């Protein structure tokens, strides 16, 4: 279970990093509106938010399973 927890936390960090990159690109578009593809960046932002939420749920589930296992063993 440690491997799945590590994978989920790495995926969560990656999704959060991608979300920050998209936010930075959107901020940059405000400075240079000619290069703006706001629709595409908004889609990426929504996708990243959903990925963060899904990975967060995975981490929560893994944490709950480990807690149950500790309760059963302890």
Image (cartoon, rainbow, N blue to C red):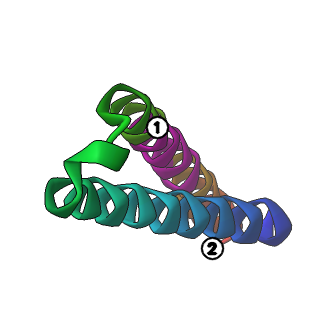
As drawn, the label of residue 44 is 1
Image coords of residue 21 (percent x, y) = 43, 65
| SS under mark 2 | loop
- Is residue 3 found left or right of 14 in the rendered image? right
As drawn, the label of residue 32 is none
- Is residue 36 found left or right of 43 in the rendered image? left
Crowding near the residue tagged with mark 1, few <14, some 14–19, many ≥20 C-alpha atoms within 10 Å: some
Membership of 11 in magenta stretch: no
Crowding near the residue tagged with mark 2, few <14, some 14–19, many ≥20 C-alpha atoms within 10 Å: few
Membership of 51 in magenta stretch: yes
Q: Which residue is mark 2?
A: 74
Q: Are marks 1 and 2 in contact (CB under 8 Å)?
A: no
Residue pictured at 15% horizontal, 55% vertical: 30
- Is residue 18 found left or right of 6 in the rendered image? left
- Is residue 55 found left or right of 27 in the rendered image? right
**Where is residue 16, by image quadrant?**
bottom left
Q: CA distance from mark 1 to mark 2?
A: 44 Å
Residue 30 versus residue 74 in the image, above or below: above
Depth check, front residue: 43 or 73 = 43
Q: Give the main secondary structure, helix, strand or loop, of the magenta stretch.
A: helix
Residue pictured at 36% horizontal, 47% vertical: 35
Residue pictured at 34% horizontal, 26% vertical: 39
Q: What segment carries the magenta color? A: 48-60
Mark 1 or mark 2: which comes first in sequence? 1
Image quarter where the N terminus lies is: bottom right
Image quarter where the C terminus lies is: bottom right
Q: Nearer the viewer, mark 1 or mark 2?
A: 1
Residue 4 versus residue 54 in the image, above or below: below
**Where is residue 34, by image quadrant?**
top left
Depth check, front residue: 41 or 56 = 41
Residue pictured at 52% horizontal, 52% vertical: 64
């Amino acid at each position: 279970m440690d491997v799945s927890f590590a994978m989920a936390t790495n995926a969560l960090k990656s999704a959060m990093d991608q979300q920050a990159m998209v936010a930075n690109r959107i901020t940059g578009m405000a400075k240079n509106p000619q290069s703006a593809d706001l629709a595409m960046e908004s889609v990426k932002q929504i996708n990243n938010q959903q990925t963060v939420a899904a990975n967060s749920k995975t981490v929560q589930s893994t944490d709950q399973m480990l807690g149950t296992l500790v309760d059963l063993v302890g």
